[in-house]
Image: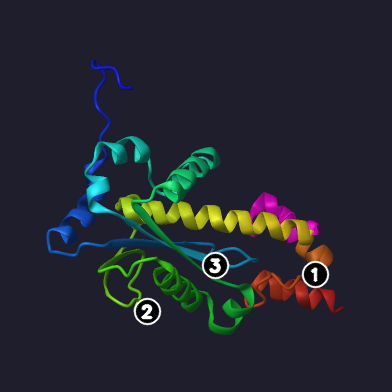
Amino acid sequence: MQNSEEKPLSLDQSLLFFEKKYWSENYALIAGVDEAGRGPLAGPVVAAAVILERNFIESGDAAELLDGLTDSKKLSAKKRAKFFSVLMGEPHIKIGVGLVDSETIDEINILQATHNAMALAVADLPVKPDFVLVDGLPVKTFPCESKSIVGGDSKSLSIAAASVIAKVVRDEHMVVLDQKYPQYHFAKHKGYGTQLHVEALFEFGPCPEHRYSFRPVREAEAMSRL
């Protein structure tokens, strides 16, 4: 229970600018969309779509549960896990997830794979959104109108929520892959091109989870054939 002398918690209204704008234009269900894993040398690209119900956001419960939520890159792993649990457990928050594997990334390129993952995430929502707020550049694969926002994960609460879901889901996926391919230490670097990863890549050669269209992986594969 909150002490009567304490200042009531409130959501950062600057993070609700876009949601409020489109709510005022009669778009009831607004989904924030973001991805994780465009840059790694291995593993899938994962996208998430999150709808924060308007009535919930305007309630005191949302202010308490989502206080401090922002771009996942600005949160510690502990805080990401906390918000992930909150987001997944709240019935007034709708979530969809899309994943595109490394083989498909090689076939269609990482940009197209990212857009596909975002479309899959929106399609995975339990309800169809009326409008999508997407982090980054325009995406043409959504089934409704959308607004692209560069740096959106730090400008929109819905996109920030999606960034947390995408990041945690992908990180957990890489931990599972680490058990299958322990020589690459995926649990430590999540597939990104760290020194530890690149050294293992050139020592053991790439595995099926690596992205062969990425230059370090191609170079490691060529070296393994010598």
Between the residue at mark 2 and the residue at mark 1, the CA separation in whole angstroms equals 35 Å
Q: Amino acid at mark 3?
A: Val
In the drawing, does residue 11 fall left or right of residue 180? left
Q: Amino acid at mark 1?
A: Gly
Q: Which mark is on residue 205?
A: 1
Figure coloring: rainbow
Q: Secondary structure at mark 2?
A: loop
Image quadrant in which the C terminus is located: bottom right
3 or 1: tag closer to the N-terminus: 3
Q: Is residue 139 visible?
A: yes
Q: Position of residue 57 (x, y in %)?
A: 26, 46
Residue most extreme to the bottom: 107
In the drawing, does residue 51 fall left or right of residue 13? right
According to the picture, the residue beneath numbered tag 3 turns out to be 45
Residue most extreme to the right: 226
Say few, some or many: other residues with alpha carbon within 10 Å of mark 3 (under 14 / 14 to 19 / 20 or more): many
Q: Amino acid at mark 2?
A: Thr
Q: Which mark is on residue 89?
A: none
According to the picture, the residue beneath numbered tag 2 turns out to be 141
Say few, some or many: other residues with alpha carbon within 10 Å of mark 2 (under 14 / 14 to 19 / 20 or more): some
- Start and end of the magenta stretch? 182-199
Q: Secondary structure at mark 1?
A: loop
Q: Name the residue rendered at 38%, 43% in the picture.
A: 69
* Residue 183 among those drawn in magenta: yes
Q: Position of residue 222 (x, y in %)?
A: 78, 78
Report the number of discs: 3
Between the residue at mark 3 and the residue at mark 1, the CA separation in whole angstroms equals 21 Å
Say few, some or many: other residues with alpha carbon within 10 Å of mark 1 (under 14 / 14 to 19 / 20 or more): many
In the drawing, does residue 219 fall left or right of residue 9? right
Q: Secondary structure at mark 3?
A: strand
Image quadrant in which the N terminus is located: top left
